[in-house]
Amino acid sequence: MRLIGVGVGPGDPELVTLKAARVLSTADRVFVPVLGTDRPGPAREDPDQSAAEPGRAETTVAAHTAPERVERLVFVLDRAQRDGYWAAAGRRVAQWLRETGGVAAFATIGDPNLYSTFGYLARQVRALVPDVVIETVPGITAMQALASVSGTVLAEGREPLVLLPQPDGADGISAALSEGATSAALPRNATVVVYKGGRHLPAIASAVAAAGREAVLGSHLGLPDERIAALSTVDGAVPYLSTVLIPAKREGE
């Protein structure tokens, strides 16, 4: 029996790799994460899958997999509840593996080894089914997709690349953008990418401006309502999964 974490990219079905498409089309069951409605109290043993809206991964998977082979796993963003939902999802996948001995795929946006739900799910399943074989298929990340559609180079030469997930404010960004930063953790003149920073966009924009840098924002990458804009021109709320790309300062630019 096998569990394969499959990266399906940022949302465009054409950005799914050939290997990912093959795994999605041949796996016995394709599990997809969907966002449920946060409710007070612990996660239910059987979260209501039908109540959740199709997620970005499920929408992408639909181009490569028959719908009858897809099963939803409900997750929530609320920190107080998410562990319970991870555990419930792990129990369901483990149950399916024990009953069938087959091959299950778990589709995740981006890459399964980079800020993905798959790592949590895989640990839960391995604890319940120790002999399961766990594999991953890499996927195109949001920062790669944003760099491509915006015509922005992520890194050149010996430039470091700093990736910051969902900051609580702009302190980490300000330090990463500092020209005086010289440590390995906060290198000088790095390209900085911010994931899941939608709720902190004003603070991020202020930190970028204070550092004399420019940035580009991308939201709904690869989808019909994709938005690419200079960060300095963005006003108002943006989606939670928005990505901000702040290129390193380069001579001649």
Image (tube, rainbow, N blue to C red):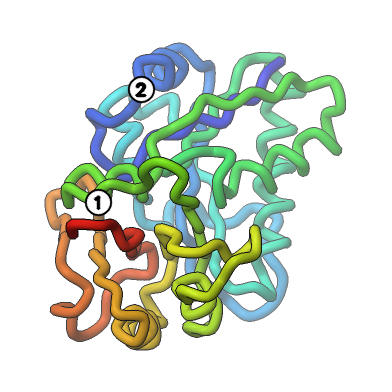
Local SS, label 2: loop
Residue 198 % position (x, y): 36, 74
Depth order, front residue of 84/174: 174
Residue at the spot x=72%, y=70% of the render?
Answer: 42
> Of marks 1 and 2, which one's residue comes earlier in the chain?
2
**Which of the 4 image quadrants contains residue 157?**
top left
Can residue 173 be seen from the camera position used here? yes
Q: Is residue 76 left or right of residue 95?
A: left
**Three-letter code, disc 2:** Thr
Above or below residue 12? Residue 253 is below
Depth order, front residue of 224/129: 224
Local SS, label 1: loop
Query: Dot 2: few (<14), some (14–19), or many (≥20) neighbours within 10 Å?
Result: some
Above or below residue 140? Residue 200 is below
Q: Is residue 99 left or right of residue 70?
A: right
Quote the CA–CA distance across marks 1 and 2.
Answer: 16 Å
* Mark number displayed over residue 17: 2
Q: Which quadrant of the figure contains the C terminus?
A: bottom left
* Mark number displayed over residue 182: none
Residue at the spot x=45%, y=12% of the render?
Answer: 26
Depth order, front residue of 231/239: 231
Residue that badge 1 annotates: 221
Depth order, front residue of 58/154: 154
Residue at the spot x=43%, y=65% of the render?
Answer: 194
**Three-letter code, disc 1:** Leu
Residue 57 % position (x, y): 39, 42
Residue 55 % position (x, y): 37, 50
Residue at the spot x=42%, y=15% of the render?
Answer: 19
